Image (cartoon, rainbow, N blue to C red):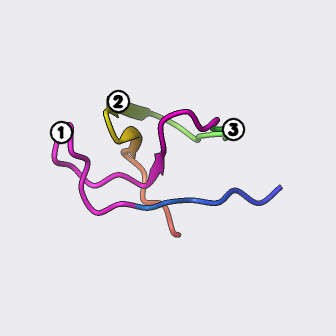
Amino acid sequence: MVLDRTPVDECPECGEKAYDHVEPGEKYEGDPIGYIRVCVAEEGAFFHSNRQVDL
């Protein structure tokens, strides 16, 4: 399965770089490795990781 990633430069909630972004109402299916943090804002969910992710 290939996931469509929507990388963003900056999360509007915390200001940090996010490796993926899911619009409101969309479903996300993934298998993250290690620690992740998710911020939820009006623009959707923003996924952060302490691990470098190549897009």
- Circle nearer the N terminus (3, 2): 3
Looking at this view, name the residue that lies furthest to the bottom.
55
Taking depth in this image into account, of 20 and 51 the one nearest to the observer is 20
Q: Tag 2's secondary structure?
A: strand
Is 30 within the magenta? no
Q: Nearer the viewer, mark 1 or mark 2?
A: 2
| 17 horizontally vs 46: left or right | left
Magenta-highlighted residues: 8-27
Q: Would you place residue 45 above or below residue 16 in this image? A: above
Classify residue 3 by image quadrant. Answer: bottom right
**What label does residue 43 carry, if any?**
none
x then y, percent, for residue 48: 37, 43
Identified by mark 1, the residue type is Cys
Image point 64% across, 60% down: which residue?
4
Q: Which residue is mark 2?
A: 40
Taking depth in this image into account, of 55 and 41 the one nearest to the observer is 41
* CA separation in Å, label 3 and label 1: 23 Å
Image point 69% across, 38% down: which residue?
29
Identified by mark 2, the residue type is Val
x then y, percent, for residue 15: 16, 47
Local crowd size for mark 2, using a 10 Å CA cut-off: few (<14), some (14–19), many (≥20): some
Q: Tag 1's secondary structure?
A: loop
| 18 horizontally vs 31: left or right | left
x then y, percent, for residue 18: 35, 52
**What label does residue 29 carry, if any?**
3
- Report the magenta stretch's main SS: loop
Local crowd size for mark 1, using a 10 Å CA cut-off: few (<14), some (14–19), many (≥20): few
Q: Which residue is mark 1?
A: 14
